[in-house]
Image (tube, rainbow, N blue to C red):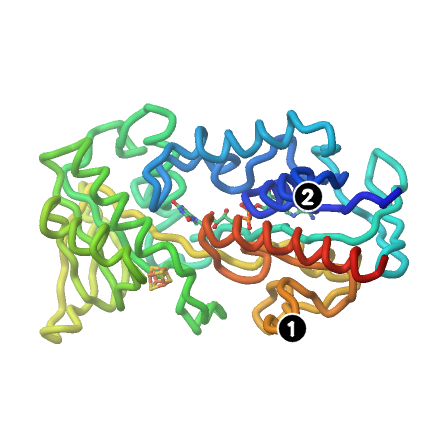
């Protein structure tokens, strides 16, 4: 009988991989370090997802239910893999609190870590309570609490969203573009305008990367239908005049200094490599790429390979990814794992 396939990480990529394997009759073991499945969209309480507009708890919650209810998938939450030895087709994994299991291959779907804005102190996070991150605004909306200034609970009349916080910033060692935050921010700006029609929303940007079809659905729509204002700027600092937050910088189109007051400032935080990656790489014997994400092999030969045969990788563990692409990669990794088995058989 074929050995099960190990899937590590129960976010969108891992849920897709596990479900794909089970749907063709393969057993798999899904190991998740947190006490719940769902990955960032569930654990961080995202509100409505782009581009579907569905609530995260319904869309990703549906993926979780499909996995939890499947007899072919054994789920271990609050667990990690501590050792992983052997050869393709014949690995032994030690799962904390469970013991050792024999598996045919492994798919790493261990995702990313949200950028911690405390690493960008000059933009006010951690100093002023009304400087918040996109995840905090997602939680305000998904919990039904509504958008309120954390300092005193008032409804903001002016909100600034600062893009590229913790991305495209060489000074703090984060050179990459996090890919989805322009789109998420344009969508968030529209949601704020919908909930608070009297609130003015400004987006400060270096470049706008609402890639592909998102340009129409988010960038233009947010300006034309929702009157969101875009300012191309280099931000110097976020301070306070005692009453309101002050965003200071340079408008890089007209090359003039700009100082604008706001009630709330939102950091559109990026996607860092999983803080656990050094340990994951050591445990599974795989290499990381130069930024600290899990390295991928030759995409054209076979998708989702790492540097170690029999260990595959999918989703934002490989670098910033959207949910749709993470799901696609999880499904593709399952197919690669099956192909390897059938060619070995
Ligand atoms: C503010 C914000 C909003 C976003 N909104 C959207 C959106 O609307 N639409 C969109 O397409 N994308 C969005 N994204 C991107 C989205 O979060 C990712 O595309 C998605 O979460 C990637 O899924 P994943 O399964 O690869 O990783 P994750 O969601 O990070 O899941 C990884 C899982 O692995 C687990 N894990 C980690 N390490 C280990 C370990 N050592 N052992 C076991 N388990 C482990 C984690 O606990 C987690 O459950 C957003 C990103 C941000 C920052
Ligand atoms: S997607 Fe937009 S906000 Fe995010 S890092 Fe890229 S350019 Fe910056």
In this rendering, does residue 242 appear at all?
no
- Residue 239 position, x and y percent, is 25, 53
Which one is nearer the viewer's eye here, 44 or 265? 44
In this rendering, does residue 234 appear at all?
yes
Q: Residue 301's mark? A: 1
Relative to 118, say whether 11 is above or below: above
Q: Secondary structure at mark 1?
A: loop
Relative to 147, say whether 216 is above or below: below
Residue at label 2?
A: 21
- Residue 257 position, x and y percent, is 13, 69
Which one is nearer the viewer's eye here, 51 or 179? 51
The residue that appears at 63% across and 46% down in the rendered structure is 17
Q: Earlier in the sequence, mark 1 or mark 2?
A: 2
Which quadrant holds residue 249?
A: bottom left
- Residue 323 position, x and y percent, is 46, 48
Query: Label 1: how many residues lie within 10 Å, few (<14), some (14-19) or many (20+)?
Result: few
Query: Label 2: how many residues lie within 10 Å, few (<14), some (14-19) or many (20+)?
Result: many
The residue that appears at 40% across and 69% down in the rendered structure is 169
Which one is nearer the viewer's eye here, 112 or 239? 112
Which quadrant holds residue 189?
A: top left
């Amino acid at each position: 009988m074929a050995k099960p396939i190990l899937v590590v990480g129960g976010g969108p990529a891992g849920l897709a991989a596990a479900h794909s394997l089970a749907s063709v009759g393969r057993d798999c073991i899904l190991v998740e370090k947190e006490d719940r499945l769902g990955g960032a969209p569930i654990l961080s309480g995202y509100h409505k997802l782009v581009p579907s507009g569905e609530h995260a708890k319904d869309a990703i919650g549906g993926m979780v239910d499909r996995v939890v209810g499947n007899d072919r998938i054994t789920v271990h939450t609050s667990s990690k893999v501590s050792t992983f030895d052997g050869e393709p087709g014949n690995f032994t994994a030690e799962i904390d609190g469970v013991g050792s299991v024999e598996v045919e291959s492994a798919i790493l779907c261990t995702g990313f870590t949200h950028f911690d804005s405390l690493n960008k102190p000059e933009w006010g996070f951690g100093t002023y309570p009304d400087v918040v991150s996109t995840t905090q605004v997602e939680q305000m909306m998904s919990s039904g609490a509504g958008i309120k200034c954390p300092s005193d609970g008032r409804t903001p009349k002016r909100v600034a969203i600062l893009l590229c916080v913790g991305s495209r910033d060489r000074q703090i060692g984060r050179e990459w573009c996090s890919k989805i935050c322009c789109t998420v921010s344009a969508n968030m700006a529209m949601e704020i305008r919908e909930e608070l029609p009297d609130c003015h929303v400004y987006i400060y940007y270096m470049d706008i990367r609402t890639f592909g079809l998102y340009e129409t659905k988010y960038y233009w729509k947010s300006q034309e239908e929702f009157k969101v204002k875009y300012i191309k700027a280099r931000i110097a600092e976020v301070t306070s005049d005692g009453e309101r937050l002050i965003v200071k910088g340079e408008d890089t189109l007209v090359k003039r200094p700009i100082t604008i007051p706001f009630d709330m400032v939102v950091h559109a935080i990026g996607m860092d490599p999983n803080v656990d990656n050094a340990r994951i790489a050591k445990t599974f014997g795989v290499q990381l790429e130069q930024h600290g994400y899990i390295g991928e092999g030759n995409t054209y030969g076979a998708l989702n390979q790492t540097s170690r045969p029999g260990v595959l990788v999918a989703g934002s563990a490989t670098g910033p990814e959207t949910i749709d692409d993470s799901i696609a990669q999880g499904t593709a990794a399952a197919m690669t794992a099956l192909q390897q088995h059938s060619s070995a058989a």
